[in-house]
Amino acid sequence: MSERLAIAGSGAIACGLAAVAATRGEVTVFARSDASCDRATAKVHSICEKLGAHVNGNVTVSRDPDVLSDATFVVEAIVEDPDTKAAFWQGLNGHVPQDAILATTTSSLPVTDLAHASGHPERFVGLHVFNPVPKMDLVELAFPPEADDMTRRRAHELCEALGKTAVEVPDTPGFVVNRLLFPFLFEAVRLMERTELSAEAVDTCMRLGAGHPMGPLALLDLVGLDVSAAIGRTIDVEIPETIERLVAEGALGRKTGRGFHTY
């Protein structure tokens, strides 16, 4: 991997991407608190153990923004909130080199808006990877109109270096995958609401009958019900009442131990 990659975030996408990158070279993870650093370190090392324990030494986790100072490619993978992401990019000036490529892993927010928040839209790209990152081969690349040829080339080259298949998609809410996927996932919830079918029954039908590796309700749990609701709002799809209720209860899926299923 020719890029010096730095990733901001401590969640599943940030840690999964860091672990994959660590199998190809050195990677830095920036988290904003000691607790986030500890969480990211544990999560990245857990994934690395499955990929090959030797890659643990390739990962540096720090809360000091100066660790970004020698990065050539900075990927933001923080909470899916437009104001939080914009504030991150606005506060990054002075911490990264002027020729570094800037990327966001947003799954649904307008890349162009975040590019303008960064102040460098010509060097900006939406780099939408999928969870779990080590297992999912696709990366959706969405560029703002100002993105130059070098940014496009280096984004594609990074994906190739990480062993991923990159597809350029329009900068529209949900890009391609989520735009098509979440109406289907939410319809599975509504089917459950209208009938007496259990989550297990719906998921079993889609796994065994449609050949899906995971049922729709289990997939919502994996994504996170709070994240799923946020994506639904962004792509202007009505959120099922059951999802709204579970989110209000703090049952967000796998990350909290309970969603449509119990973990």
Image (cartoon, rainbow, N blue to C red):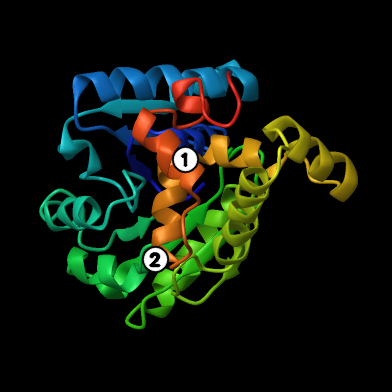
Image location (x, y in percent) of residue 39:
35, 20
Image location (x, y in percent) of residue 155:
47, 63
Q: Residues within 10 Å of mark 1 (few under 14, many from 20)?
A: many
Image location (x, y in percent) of residue 60:
34, 27
Give the side of residue 45 with respect to residue 103, left or right.
Answer: right
Q: Helix, strand or loop at disc 1?
A: helix
Of the residues under marks 1 and 2, which one precedes in the sequence? 2
Residue visible at 28% across and 23% down in the picture: 37
Q: Name the residue that disc number 2 marks.
A: 125
Residue toward you, 248 or 68 = 248
Residue visible at 46% across and 58% down in the picture: 232
Q: CA distance from mark 1 to mark 2?
A: 26 Å
- Whether residue 26 can be seen here: no
Residue toward you, 69 or 80 = 80
In which quadrant is the C terminus drawn? top right
- Farthest right residue? 209
Amino acid at circle 1? Leu
Image location (x, y in percent) of residue 32:
20, 32
Residue visible at 26% across and 63% down in the picture: 99
Looking at the picture, does residue 107 appear above or below residue 150?
A: above
